[in-house]
Image (cartoon, rainbow, N blue to C red):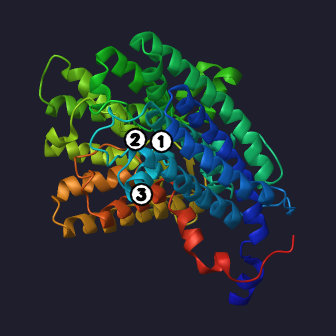
Amino acid sequence: MAEQSKTVSYAVRWRVLLKYLGMLGIVLAALNSVPLAVALLFGEFEVAGRYAVMLVALLALALPLARMTVPKQLQMNEAMTVVVLVFLLGSLVSSYTLGAASTSWLDSWFEAISGITTTGLSTMASVEDKPSAFLFARAWMQWYGGLGIVVLSLALFLRNSVAGRKLMDTEATGETLVSSTQAYARRIAIVYGMLTACALIATWLVMGDGFVALVHSLSAVSTGGFSSFDDSLAGLGPDAAAVVMGFAWLGAVSLPLYFLIWQKGPGSLLQDPELRALLIATAALSGLLYLWLPTGENGWLDALLMGMSAQSTTGFSTLAVADLDDASKIAMIGSMLVGGSVGSTAGGFKLLRLLLLLRLVQLVVARAAAPRHAVIEARLGGRRVDDEDLWRAMLLMVMFMLLVFLSWLAFVAHGYPALDALFEVVSASATVGLSTGITRPDLEPFLKAVLCFDMLAGRMEIFALLVVLYPGTWFGKRSGA
């Protein structure tokens, strides 16, 4: 059996990695030309100079690599490795450009990782005094990071899993991983673009400030949560905050579902069990927060918006998390862990996996009470669920909790309150961005690095990082195809 495993397992091919990294490097250069234009428009020439240097260096490296000839077929471990490396590359190059408004490289890298993973945590004491290009760049990183995750996460779900079939719906979109991803990307790009355009128009009409509306719209649909105000949505007023948070919640819905509206009509959305779970979870959390939060003029609205923010893993806030009671924090921790839908820009371990876990429990109970030869299958949304899918979902949830636990120990060991430390770690791992105040400029460098790892691991579903860290990914027999 061991010998068979060696013959069917292949290490990544360097030429394939370099080829796709080169192609994605060109895409990164094109995306970063937008903040360059914004910096020039606002006359912020120091920031523009950094972007110009970065673009020249990135293209000089990426263009030769993109011309390499490689096999068309992409291995699963190669796809996952490319996903991890492109997020690392994107955060590293952006740390140089964001450094124009930061006091240290670690803080600028933290900001870049928080942006590209659509987390929204920040070590900045204040952002209202930062250049306009800096504020736009953070929101822009969240926007294309959110789109990239939705598209590239397809590589994690193409091995006959329930999530893969959910993302791909029932239609064949290609023969190889590359062609499937391209077809899926075209569909999702249309939905994502239309959702962004609607968010921008609506927020602009409510706010009256085009730049502020643009920043918050980009952060909203990507469930990112970066704001141009120090007090987040509290600086916008209730009407604008409700509009922004509404589009952020829509970003936590599986984007392929929106495509079904055009095919089958709006009624098809409510047939999705994950969307129904998202509605129920958001309503339940908002109701609990309404009971526990201090009563005020906008008490019900604050409870609703904070509930939507935590469940969608957006990270916008109308209240200071540090001022909430312990019960509210615990409830929000649970919601942040679960997160939004598979195929959305939301973080967490996803509602689909929670539903699969509940199906697993149901299956175990049903089989225990059934005759020995009875055949009982788990089903979700009218589809049969394989046992392998159930156990894979449970494994990822266990790994997610292990990541949170180990990171939490690091914060507790440094003397931080247990509940606040848990909230902070969950917020980073689930790519939420809500903070109890622990994430700050003078946070210990080691703990900043822990949060950076949590943001990357949580956004890339943990498995992708494990594939990169697995020795067999790099050493061993390589496919000649």
- Picture coordinates of residue 384 (x, y %)? 62, 49
Q: Where does label 2 land, which residue? A: 313
- Image position, residue 429 (x, y; %): 39, 55
- Is there any visible trace of residue 384 in the rendered image? no
> Residue 105 — which label?
3
Please report the residue visible at 41 percent of the width from the left and 54 percent of the height from the top. 110
One can see residue 156 in this view: yes
Residue positioned most to the bottom: 3
Residue 448 location, x and y as percent?
34, 60
Relative to 241, residue 157 above or below? below
Give the image quarter of residue 447: bottom left
Disc 3 from disc 2: Cα separation:
27 Å
Disc 1 marks which residue?
346
Quadrant in which the C terminus appears: bottom right
Q: At x 54% / y 41%, what residue is drawn?
A: 146
Q: CA distance from mark 3 to mark 1?
A: 27 Å
- Mark nearer the N terminus (3 vs 2): 3
Residue sitting at 59 percent across and 70 percent down?
A: 468
Q: Amino acid at mark 3?
A: Trp
Crowding at mark 1 (Cα within 10 Å: few <14, some 14-19, many 20+): many
Q: Amino acid at mark 2?
A: Thr
Of the numbered discs 3 and 1, the one sitting upstream in the chain is: 3
Q: In this orientation, which residue lies closer to the viewer: 132 or 265?
A: 132
Q: Secondary structure at mark 1?
A: loop
Does the residue at mark 1 contact the one at mark 2 (Cβ under 8 Å)? yes
Q: Which structural element holds mark 2?
A: loop
The mark closer to the camera, 3 or 2, is: 3
Residue 175 lies left or right of residue 130; in this view the side is: right
Residue type, label 1: Ala
Q: Are marks 3 and 1 in contact (CB under 8 Å)?
A: no
- C-alpha span from label 1 to label 2: 6 Å
Q: Which mark is residue 121?
A: none
